[in-house]
Image: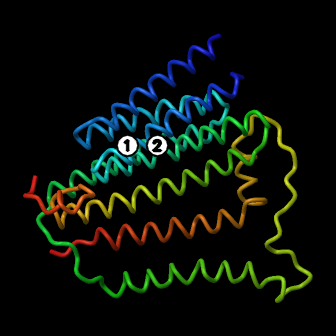
Amino acid sequence: MLPIYYYLFLSSALLLIGIIGIVARRNIVIKLFSIELILNAVIINLMAFARVFADAGGQTFSMFIFAIIAAEFFVAVAIVAAVFRRWQNPSSSPAERDAPAL
Amino acid sequence: MHGQITFFLLAAIAVLSTVMMVSSAKTVHSAIFLALTLLATSGIFLQLRAPLLFAAQLLAVACLLMGVIIFAIEVGTADVALAAEYSWRYKTAGILAAIAPALVIAFALLQRRLWPGEKLTELLPRAPLPWPLSISEITLSFYSHDLLPMALLLFILLIAAIGIGAVSQRRA
């Protein structure tokens, strides 16, 4: 197995880019994708430590996170679709939402 | 050596596509880059000898693409207002979905008083498992040691499904 810090560097890179996506972008769909990315980074961390300690807990917990990701993603997509139908604009900023339609 | 090269390749794909995802102007491009990131991380899961997670990640990618397509169709035909009120079926389903996890939590909290001798929600001792884990061992773990979290999770998914139906309900 590769050293664990390889996986830690990768997951922290994904985490940081995900945080940048949440903070910097105004499009709520991309914010949602960034959240998915952060959760994916968490799963990589869990799996790397589960592999190091040969523990089943990491893998089972990762499956739970996967289910949460799926639920969160589809509810969020439905909400975004509703927002889009109402304002014709997926921005999280009220000023941009009230702007003319795309 | 081969493992190292594979890891660096997959990690580079994951990081680059993530950067592209965040910096893309169009949402559809972002979704495609996110799918690429998820595919690269699924390769890393396979490298960590987690075949179940690999399969789940592939399913997640498929679901993501399907969600994006549905979203595109939804947005493409956006000629109706947000639903003002929901039908009684959605209200009933929502109330039932709220009551069900409340009952599970109440059961978990009260079971010691109702049945003092029984240990229905005690976690079973976790036996050491060989690595790599087989899918049957993980499934066994779901239905023995992790049964209560699994039940709660299924309720969360049920609520999510009802939420999707409620939020995306159309009014012609």
Q: Nearer the viewer, mark 1 or mark 2?
A: 1
Q: Position of residue B53 (x, y in %)?
A: 59, 41
State the CA–CA distance, disc 1 to disc 2: 9 Å
Left or right: residue B135 versus residue B71 is right
Q: Amino acid at mark 1?
A: Gly
Left or right: residue A5 versus residue B70 is right
Q: Position of residue B117 (x, y in %)?
A: 92, 82
Q: How many marks?
A: 2
Q: Position of residue B108 (x, y in %)?
A: 74, 78
Q: Is residue B14 above or below residue B73?
A: above
> Residue at the spot x=42%, y=86% of the render?
B92
Label 2 sits on residue? A37
**Quadrant in which residue B4 is drawn:** top right
Dot 1: few (<14), some (14–19), or many (≥20) neighbours within 10 Å? many
Task: Looking at this view, name the residue that lies furthest to the left.
Answer: A100
N-term-proximal mark, 1 vs 2 = 1
Q: Position of residue A79 (x, y in %)?
A: 32, 64
> Residue at the spot x=43%, y=67% of the render?
B161
Q: Amino acid at mark 2?
A: Leu
Does the residue at mark 1 contact the one at mark 2 (Cβ under 8 Å)? yes
> Which secondary structure, mark 1?
helix
Left or right: residue A76 versus residue A52 is left
